[in-house]
Amino acid sequence: SQTIHQWPATLVQPVGSPLSLECTVEGTSNPNLYWYRQAAGRGLQLLFYSVGIGQISSEVPQNLSASRPQDRQFILSSKKLLLSDSGFYLCAWSVKRSSGNTIYFGEGSWLTVV
Amino acid sequence: GEDVEQSLFLSVREGDSSVINCTYTDSSSTYLYWYKQEPGAGLQLLTYIFSNMDMKQDQRLTVLLNKKDKHLSLRIADTQTGDSAIYFCAESGPGGYNKLIFGAGTRLAVHP
């Protein structure tokens, strides 16, 4: 069966510090991978998605970047965190289909920028 | 444009039915989803419905889809305290790569 792991689960970082959140998927190959952010009291915003190694699409301009160095590894990074980067970050994956496919989420990472 | 709207809060008595409503805008969405998020956790897929269906039932869950009005609802029968969570509606949206578009979530509170 497929599983998705992301870490760390919680993170408190000072403004201006770097960030690295990591996500790995097991039990599948060549998945689509996603990073979502959930700000307090708000819905989910798609930040990045990837259809293959080294292929990253950004949905919104921001202070963050993503990389996919291996097929089942997705990394969310920042060089200098802002207060507004605080939130709940969710990694997700899906099988490749033309449309209407289910997305499966990791357990999330709480980031507090202080 | 792409937009999914749902009410933010619903309170029900234990044992009653809960109905969570959602409206979406993209008529080309082929699938519509309901996810559940318990406190501090990720999202768990509850159920989904294909756009050519009107209804889907899965144990205590019933999904109704009115494609003409772009209205989706989730009914939970015999609501229990363990059903307390945030429920997200999502549409598959335009284009590929499964870029689901989520609503802001409805917080369901179940009280005795």
Image: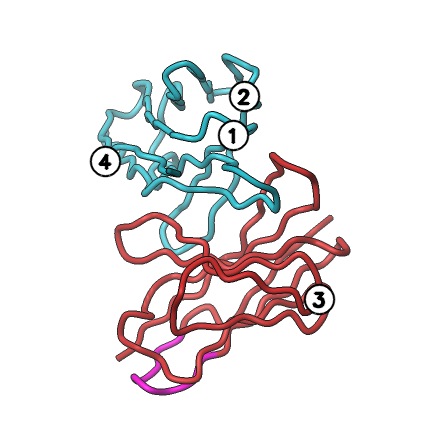
Amino acid type assigned to the residue bearing label 2 in the image: Ser
Please identify the residue farthest to the front as the structure is shown: B1
Labels 3 and 1 touching (C-beta < 8 A) = no
Q: Which mark is residue B29?
A: 1
Q: Is residue A14 magenta?
A: yes
* Location of residue A82 with respect to A51 vertically, above or below: below
Q: Earlier in the sequence, mark 4 or mark 1?
A: 4
Q: CA distance from mark 3 to mark 4?
A: 40 Å
For the colour cyan, the matching chain is B
Tell if the residue under mark 3 belongs to the same chain as the one under mark 1: no
Instruction: Say the numbered circle drawn on residue B51.
Output: 2
Give, as a single range, the part of the protein colored magenta. A11-19
Q: In the image, what residue occupies the spot 30% across and 18% down?
A: B16
- Spot occupied by residue B67 in the image (x, y as percentages of width and height): 44, 17
Distance in Å between CA atoms under marks 4 and 2: 26 Å
Residue B13: x and y in percent read 24, 25
Name the amino acid type tagged 4: Phe
Give the vertical position of B33 relative to A2 (above or below): above
The chain in red:
A
In the rendered structure, the residue with mark 1 lies on which chain? Answer: B
Residue A16 shown in magenta: yes
- Give the residue type that dot 3 points to: Ile
Front position in the image: B3 or A94: B3
